[in-house]
């Protein structure tokens, strides 16, 4: 954190002294929302989601962009209150603590401080875009129970246009290959209109080739942003859904709901 190279941006800023890089964060974690979610993958619900502000990708379709653009000025939940809330959510029946953002990797320091204060048997779900480097992998080793990994784009052109990171695919693949050796892994892909052949198909083919036993969560709930910019401007079509389902069938992937 004193010379931050947690992710491929390698900003080299001193976050301990308040300097900020692409993710816009100093060393602390800024939790802007916590809630129990019933719509995650069925084996994970009810899931206690804890959202951290700040991200190292610039996805044009981000649904929480208002908390990521200036992550340190959002109203946040203090760590002590969050610890109590995590305990309460467990008592209410939450099966796990689901860490997400933004991108949780850029808040790893604050997340480690939080995890130190919660009961050790809490099941941890790492809900991430998987765009980070070795120091984050090292920090997560042995801490995470389930990697819930978003694999968004299947080639560098689409990743550059829609996520702002041309190296996204290789970075995610490297982190998935590591995660699958560690513990449970669910790879989530949100099918995007007009991106079945360039993104959906290559993502699924790579999974089938590299980790055919991984669980795949295929989503059709893409919401077009306004303005759409470089992202698809419409909703997924029935013909595109059928095509994706046909691909997972051909590849014999383990699709979960
Ligand atoms: S985590 Fe943030 S400051 Fe660190 S390298 Fe990535 S974008 Fe830059
Ligand atoms: Zn594409």
Image (cartoon, helix red, strand yellow):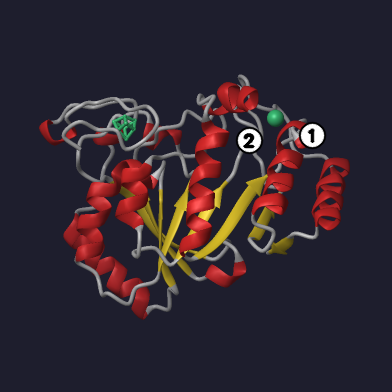
Is any atom of residue 174 visible in this view?
Answer: yes
- Image quadrant holding the C terminus, namely bottom right
Report the residue at 35% width, 59% height from top: 141
Report the residue at 23% width, 59% height from top: 114
User: Within 8 Å: ligand 2 and the Cβ of disc 1?
Assistant: yes
Question: What's the mark number on residue 197?
Answer: 1
Spot occupied by residue 139 in the image (x, y as percentages of width and height): 30, 53
Question: What's the mark number on residue 101?
Answer: none
Q: Name the residue under label 2.
A: 153
Spot occupied by residue 169 in the image (x, y as percentages of width and height): 57, 35
Report the residue at 31% width, 74% height from top: 88
Q: Which of 222 and 158 is in front in this view?
A: 158
The answer to whether residue 138 is left or right of residue 78 is right
User: Within 8 Å: ligand 2 and the Cβ of disc 2?
Assistant: yes
The answer to whether residue 195 is left or right of residue 148 is right
Q: What element carries label 1?
A: helix
Mark earlier in primary sequence (1, 2): 2
Q: Which of 168 and 63 is in front in this view?
A: 168
């Amino acid at each position: 954190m004193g010379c931050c190279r947690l992710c491929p941006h390698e900003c080299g800023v001193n976050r301990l002294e308040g300097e900020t890089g692409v993710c816009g964060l100093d060393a602390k974690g800024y939790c802007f929302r916590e809630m129990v979610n019933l719509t995650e993958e069925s084996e994970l619900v009810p899931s206690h989601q804890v959202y951290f502000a700040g991200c190292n990708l610039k996805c044009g379709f981000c649904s929480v962009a208002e908390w990521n653009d200036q992550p340190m000025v959002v109203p946040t939940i203090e760590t002590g209150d969050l610890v109590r809330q995590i305990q309460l959510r467990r008592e209410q029946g939450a099966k796990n603590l689901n860490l997400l953002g933004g991108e949780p990797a850029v808040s790893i320091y604050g997340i480690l401080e939080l995890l130190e204060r919660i009961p050790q048997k809490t099941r941890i779900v790492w809900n991430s875009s998987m765009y980070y480097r070795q120091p984050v992998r090292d920090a997560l080793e042995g801490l995470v129970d389930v990697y819930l990994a978003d694999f968004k784009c299947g080639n560098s052109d689409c990743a550059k246009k829609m996520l702002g990171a041309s190296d996204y695919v290789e970075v995610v693949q490297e982190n998935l290959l590591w995660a699958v050796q560690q513990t449970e892994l669910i790879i989530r892909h949100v099918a995007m209109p007009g991106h079945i052949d360039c993104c959906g198909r290559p993502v699924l083919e790579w999974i089938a080739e590299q980790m055919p036993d991984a669980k795949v969560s295929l989503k059709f709930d893409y919401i077009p942003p306004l303005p759409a910019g470089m992202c698809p401007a419409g909703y997924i079509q029935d013909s595109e859904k059928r095509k994706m389902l046909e691909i997972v069938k051909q590849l014999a992937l383990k699709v979960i709901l």
